[in-house]
Amino acid sequence: MTADAMPDEGELTAAGLRLDADGSVLTIWLARPGVRNAQTPAMWRALARIGAAVPPGVRVVVLRGEGASFSAGLDRAMFEPGAISGDPGLVSLAHGSDSELDDAIARYQEAFTWWRSPAFVSVAVVQGHAVGAGFQLALACDLRILADDAQLSMRETALGLVPDLGGTQPLVQAVGYGRALEICATGRWVSATEAAQVGLANIVVPVASLDATAADLVEALAAPAHGAVTALKGLLLAAGERSYGDQLAAERTTQAGLLRDLVRALE
C-alpha cells in the first residue's frame, strides 16, 4: 500500500474502518458495529483517501460491514450541533453559503464515486440493514452479494431530503426510473428476494453461506487475466453512453489492443 496516502491504522480506527489486504484483494470493513456501521464525514474522508490510494496490484475491492448490519446510513448525530467532534452538523452546513454547502456535499460524494474505477472490480457484501447512505454505498459497487436477511431502504425523503451520495443513477440503471422513484419516494424496505428479482443483487444466499460465497466470487473475479477484466469493465461502463455502432468500434479497438498484448507475450 502507499503509506503516504492511505490512512494509517489509527486514522482508520478513528473513522470507523478496518482494512484487510491479501495480495490482489483489498477488503474494506465498516467497523462501527455498535451503531450498525452508521456513517460519518470522517468515515467518508477516509474512504475517499483509500480510493485514491488503492495499489495498482489490487484486482478486487470488497466492502463489508462488521456485525449484524451492513450500514444503518448517516449517523443521526449529524443532526445535532457539535455532536460529532471536528465536523459541522447538518444544521451548520445548511446555514452556510450555497458554494460552501455544494463543496461539502461534493467532498462527501468522493467516498462513493471511486468504486467503479476500471482498475478493479468492487463487491459489496451486504447483511442486515443497508439504509440511506448504506444503500448508496452498496450501489456504488459493481456487484452486490446479499444475505437473505438483507433489507435495503432509501429513507432520505422521510427526512425531507433526497439521496445525494451518488446512489440515484446506479439505482435507475439497475431497476428503471419508475421503480427507483417508488423505492426512494416511499422509503420502503426492499427485501433480499426482491433485490434479486429487480436486479439490485447479483447473488442472494443464506447468512451462514455469505462468507464462503463472497470468497468464491472474489476468487473467480481475481482469476482471469487482469487486463481483460479491466478492459471489459471499461467497455460495459461506457456502453450506455454510446450508440451501438460506437460500442462496436470500442469493442474492436479494445480487442485489438488485448490481442496484440497476448501475441507479444507468447512470442
Image (spheres, rainbow, N blue to C red):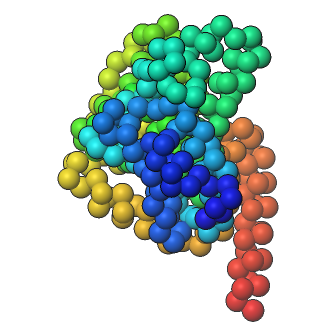
Q: Position of residue 56 (x, y in %)?
A: 66, 65
Q: What residue is at 20 percent from the left and 53 percent from the top? A: 208
Residue 130 can be seen, yes or no: no
Q: Quadrant of the N terminus?
A: bottom right
Q: Position of residue 33 (x, y in %)?
A: 32, 40
Residue 75 can be seen, yes or no: yes
Q: Is residue 202 above or below residue 180?
A: below
Q: Decide if residue 192 is on the left or right side of residue 186.
A: left
Seen from the viewer's position, the closer of residues 138 and 229 is 138
Question: How many numbered dots are placed on residues in this image?
Answer: 0
Q: Is residue 56 above or below residue 248?
A: below
Seen from the viewer's position, the closer of residues 159 and 18 is 18
Q: Decide if residue 121 is on the left or right side of residue 151.
A: right
Q: Quadrant of the C terminus?
A: bottom right
Q: What residue is at 49 percent from the left and 64 percent from the top? A: 21
Seen from the viewer's position, the closer of residues 134 and 3 is 3
Q: Is residue 142 above or below residue 60?
A: above
Q: Position of residue 40 (x, y in %)?
A: 50, 31
Q: What residue is at 62 percent from the left and 69 percent from the top? A: 57
Q: What residue is at 29 percent from the left and 61 percent from the top? A: 212
